Image: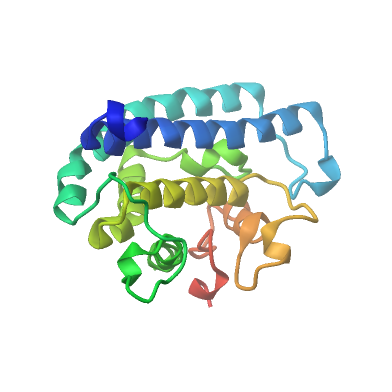
């Protein structure tokens, strides 16, 4: 339906923007509710809570930055993605390596590689603060997020998968909670919220980079 009713440009720019907004806010807003309601407080990393005014200010500025910075960046980057070979037409790339296919046709190859490339201000973060930053920083982090897809020219569905995983990862890293089911309890080298929160607690000291994805970058 999408490729029949929308152009490649619409899907790659506007489609990516709406996907990002949906995943970001739907995954981040529940952590505001948890903090306000005091639910699951035993899993909260810091005892400090953010004020209602600070949370509302964060959401307002996020909407402004996303529309004023993220959306133009997605629109402006489309010609380069197109030049590098990104497409939205059928067939979809395979989920696994096929004997006759190349690694660029593999949907699982890209997100793993993108995480490695990505790895090279709030003192008490909650999910939505993962993208609360100065516009210049948003541009820099946005560039770091899309550089992998930009140089490999993946299928649009692969780009959307990477975008979804990246948003969920950064929201989880900034959520302020460490649950028994957190990925950092099961994935080696994955930092998660407990690791990344330390970076925010020492925001105004020499706390280091503390990549939100893999701890080896800090080693």
Which of 159/138 is in front? 159
Say which residue appears at 31% left-offset and 66% top-offset. 104
User: x, y percentage for residue 166?
Assistant: 48, 51
Which of 94/123 is in front? 94
User: x, y percentage for residue 117?
Assistant: 38, 66
Q: Is residue 78 left or right of residue 209?
A: left
Say which residue appears at 62% left-offset and 40% top-offset. 126
Placement of 141 over or under 15, stated as above or below: below
User: x, y percentage for residue 25?
Assistant: 54, 31
Q: Is residue 40 left or right of residue 91?
A: right
Residue 199 shows in this picture = yes
Q: Is residue 79 left or right of residue 105?
A: left
Placement of 51 over or under 107, stated as above or below: above
Which of 58/48 is in front? 58
Quadrant of the frame with the N terminus: top left
Say which residue appears at 38% left-offset and 25% top-offset. 64
Q: In which quadrant of the rendered view does residue 116 lie?
A: bottom left
Placement of 9 over or under 145, stated as above or below: above
Placement of 88 over or under 117, stated as above or below: above
């Amino acid at each position: 339906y999408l490729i029949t009713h929308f152009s490649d440009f619409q899907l790659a720019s506007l489609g990516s923007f709406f996907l990002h907004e949906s995943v970001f806010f739907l995954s981040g807003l529940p952590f505001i509710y948890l903090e306000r309601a005091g639910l699951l407080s035993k899993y909260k990393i810091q005892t400090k809570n953010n004020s209602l005014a600070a949370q509302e200010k964060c959401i307002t500025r996020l909407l402004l930055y996303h529309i004023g910075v993220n959306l133009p960046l997605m629109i402006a980057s489309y010609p380069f993605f197109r030049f590098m070979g990104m497409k939205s037409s059928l067939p979809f790339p395979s989920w696994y390596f096929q004997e006759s296919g190349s690694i660029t046709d593999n949907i699982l190859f890209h997100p793993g590689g993108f995480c490695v490339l990505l790895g090279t201000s709030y003192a008490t973060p909650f999910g939505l603060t993962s993208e609360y930053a100065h516009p210049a920083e948003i541009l820099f982090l946005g560039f770091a997020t899309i550089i992998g897809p930009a140089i490999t020219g993946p299928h649009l569905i692969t780009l959307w998968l990477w975008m979804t995983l990246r948003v969920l990862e950064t929201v989880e890293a900034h959520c302020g909670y460490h649950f028994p089911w957190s990925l950092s309890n099961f994935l080696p080298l994955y930092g998660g919220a407990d690791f990344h929160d330390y970076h925010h607690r020492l925001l105004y000291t020499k706390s280091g980079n503390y990549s939100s994805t893999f701890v080896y970058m800090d080693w």
